[in-house]
Amino acid sequence: MANWDDLKVFLAVARGEGLSRAARDLRMDPATVGRRVSRLEERLGTMLFLKSPQGYALTEAGERMLAPAEAAESAVASGIGAVTGQGDSLTGQIRIGAPDGCANFLLPQVCAKIQRDNPGLEIQILALPRVVNLSKREADLAITVSAPDAGRLTVQKMADYHLSLAVPKELAADITSVADLRQLQTVGYIPDMIFDKELDYLSELGVPHVQLASNSFSVQLMLMRAGGGAGIAHDFAIPFAPELRLVLKDQIRLSRSYYLVRHVADRNSNRIRRISDALISGMRSEISRLESQAFAA
């Protein structure tokens, strides 16, 4: 029979797909975690994981054990909540990978609220100007700007968002048409470092090149705030940039979407589902709030 300590080890290895991350989450030595898994498999008389140099993958028996183990985890959390008053809150560590624009201007507010509602939850935000690699378990969840069509992944649309033309506020009155952009320097992505076609905004507008470029949207926004020129900015970032104004709102407004991606091995995880639902709800609310502020400015 498996006790709760056994189940904690099982869940950590299943979620981390290996010993190293599980050991970090459990604050144990990897060798100790490996021995605990082996002892659990011996007691149960079945293999729970397929071990390889790439990591630990759940067997069919392991997949069957995942939902009951998470139910036990939830029951323990509920019992603790009944005593501490925290209720059926989420616990453990979760790492969310996202493009730097989303990671800088949306996730801090969204994740802070989720963590306040679940004090036992540890949230890590991985901000990268590239696609997060879930196969290598760089993160538990990834937010992307286009839906991946390869790999053992589960994809869910989160929310739509918009981008507009932003300029330093002292220049806003001079921009009355797209032709006026030729008079300005432009800020954008380094052309050969655009990691997703959905980010190639300026070529969509016929702008041939940029004078100031970065692979990071956050850096681009700072360049625009410093008077570097005009650029395409997420509407939700504008409330954080009082030096900028949106112009040509009726002519230039791009629409994009965020997608939540998780490894297919987590498809039956109630914990991941609950965190995903909270992320999606929070992202939609925050995008709506910030975009409304941007257009009111």
Image (cartoon, rainbow, N blue to C red):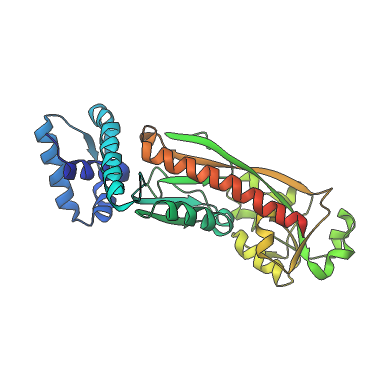
Residue 240 in the image: x percent, y percent?
A: 65, 64
Query: Residue 220 lies in what quarter of the image?
Result: bottom right
Residue depicted at x 89% and y 55%: 177
Residue depicted at x 42% and y 44%: 134
Q: Is residue 5 above or below residue 123?
A: above
User: Can you say which quadrant of the picture contains the N terminus?
Assistant: top left
Count of marks placed on residues = 0
Along the horizontal axis of the image, is 75 left or right of 123? left
User: Can you say which quadrant of the picture contains the C terminus?
Assistant: bottom right
Along the horizontal axis of the image, is 76 left or right of 252? left
Residue depicted at x 30% and y 43%: 78
Residue 222 in the image: x percent, y percent?
A: 65, 68
Q: Nearer the viewer, residue 65 or 52?
A: 65
Residue 151 seen by the camera = no
Q: Is residue 187 above or below residue 195?
A: below
Residue depicted at x 86% and y 54%: 178
Residue 215 in the image: x percent, y percent?
A: 59, 59
